[in-house]
């Protein structure tokens, strides 16, 4: 485990330093349902580094609900799991030690029940405002591809999606799903091209914007990621995950006021849903030499998340802050 102050860990520079370390480890992830059965649904697993929670890699689960991350530096990570049919899940803190060989991690996910929310409040990541008047043939190919994606049959899903866009070249949702498929097939260039096409066809397509922004963050191209996330947040202003990722990227870019504004938006619109934004806000306020306001944000974090590893770390940092200000 890397012993550094939590405040230093929050910066992007340490994330890059951690990635550059020579020692590497391997993480084997297995998703299971609460009944113990493997998660056989299509799921995306994003690996985030340290308390800064900057995404550094992502993967899609295989048929048995597993995904692997190789060549990881010794340090602290956590995972975010999402996908159609399951609730978004955070793994909590993970310690990766290079000398331990392959480390296995079980993450429990919950199914989304069809009756859990009114239909008008349910959002599909493959729906775009421009996908109107789609020919029946293209729709059928698209639905076949979705079924194949659920079965992890990426090659056949690709073929069906290519047929869909050949029939209807304005099919932005199909291009977004092609991006997902090409990511699973390891064709990163075609993944980017597909997502860019989806956005060109519909500049308000939030799912494609976030997917492309995540690629940019993994590539450490934050100047590209930030405007994409701003577009996505404007198109889908109630998506908490998009707003939190935007705040992290704004902070890493040293855009303190922008990060504060995004954090406050999460707090006032989604009160208590994501306490970590108060930590980001506190660190931005510290950069602006506003120690009292930073302390208030940390207290708010603890009000919303009073227990757990993150709360313990924040209490230690508050004690250090108080000691510095004596």
Image: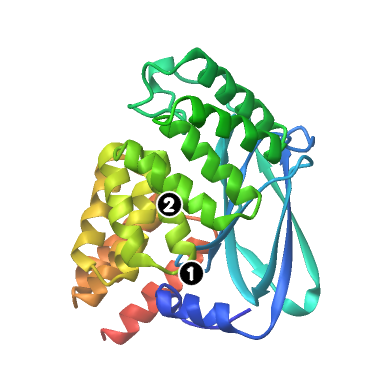
Q: Residue furthest front?
A: 166
State which quarter of the image contains the N terminus.
bottom right
Task: Tell me the tag on residue 206.
Answer: none
Image point (40%, 75%), residue name: 11
Q: Image quarter for residue 111?
A: top right
Kindly indicate whether the residue at mark 2 contacts the one at mark 1 (C-beta within 8 angstroms). Answer: no
Image point (72%, 73%), residue name: 25
Residue 35 x/y as whole percent: 76, 32
Residue 288 x/y as whole percent: 19, 75
The residue labelled by disc 2 is 212
Q: Which tag is nearer the camera, tag 1 or tag 2? A: 2
The residue labelled by disc 1 is 313
Residue 182 x/y as whole percent: 59, 47
Compared to 223, does 228 lie above or below? above
Seen in the image, is 222 located left or right of residue 295? right
CA distance separating discs 1 and 2:
32 Å
Q: Image quarter for residue 62?
A: top right
Q: Does residue 116 appear in the picture of this structure? A: yes
Seen in the image, is 145 located left or right of residue 303? right
Helix, strand or loop at mark 2:
helix
Compared to 82, does 12 lie above or below? below
Q: Nearer the viewer, residue 296 or 123?
A: 123
């Amino acid at each position: 485990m890397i012993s550094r102050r939590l405040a230093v860990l929050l910066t992007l520079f340490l994330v890059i330093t951690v990635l550059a370390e020579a020692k590497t480890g391997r993480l084997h992830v297995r998703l299971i349902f609460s009944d113990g059965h493997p998660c056989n649904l299509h799921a995306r697993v994003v690996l985030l580094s340290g308390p800064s929670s900057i995404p550094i890699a992502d993967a899609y689960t295989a048929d048995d609900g597993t995904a692997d991350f190789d060549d990881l530096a010794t340090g602290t990570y956590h995972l975010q799991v999402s996908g159609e049919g399951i609730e978004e899940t955070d793994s909590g803190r993970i310690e990766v030690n290079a000398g331990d060989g392959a480390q296995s991690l079980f993450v429990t996910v919950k199914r989304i029940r069809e009756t859990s929310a009114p239909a008008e409040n349910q959002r599909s990541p493959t729906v775009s405002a421009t996908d109107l008047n789609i020919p029946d043939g293209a729709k059928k190919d698209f639905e076949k591809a979705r079924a194949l994606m659920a079965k992890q049959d990426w090659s056949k899903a690709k073929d069906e999606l290519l047929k869909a866009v050949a029939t209807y070249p304005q099919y932005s949702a199909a291009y977004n799903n092609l991006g997902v498929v090409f990511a699973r097939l390891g064709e990163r260039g075609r993944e980017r091209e597909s997502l860019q096409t989806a956005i060109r066809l519909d500049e308000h397509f939030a799912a494609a914007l976030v997917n492309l922004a995540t690629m940019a963050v993994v590539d450490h191209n934050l100047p590209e990621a930030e405007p994409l996330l701003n577009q996505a947040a404007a198109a889908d202003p109630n998506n908490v995950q998009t707003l939190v990722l935007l705040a992290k990227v704004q902070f890493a870019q040293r855009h303190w006021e922008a990060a504060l504004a995004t954090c406050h938006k999460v707090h006032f619109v989604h009160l208590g849903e994501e306490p970590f934004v108060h930590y980001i806000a506190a660190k931005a306020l510290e950069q602006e030499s506003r120690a009292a306001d930073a302390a208030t944000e940390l207290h708010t974090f603890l009000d919303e998340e009073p227990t757990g590893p993150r709360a313990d770390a924040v209490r230690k940092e508050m004690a250090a802050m108080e000691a510095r200000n004596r």
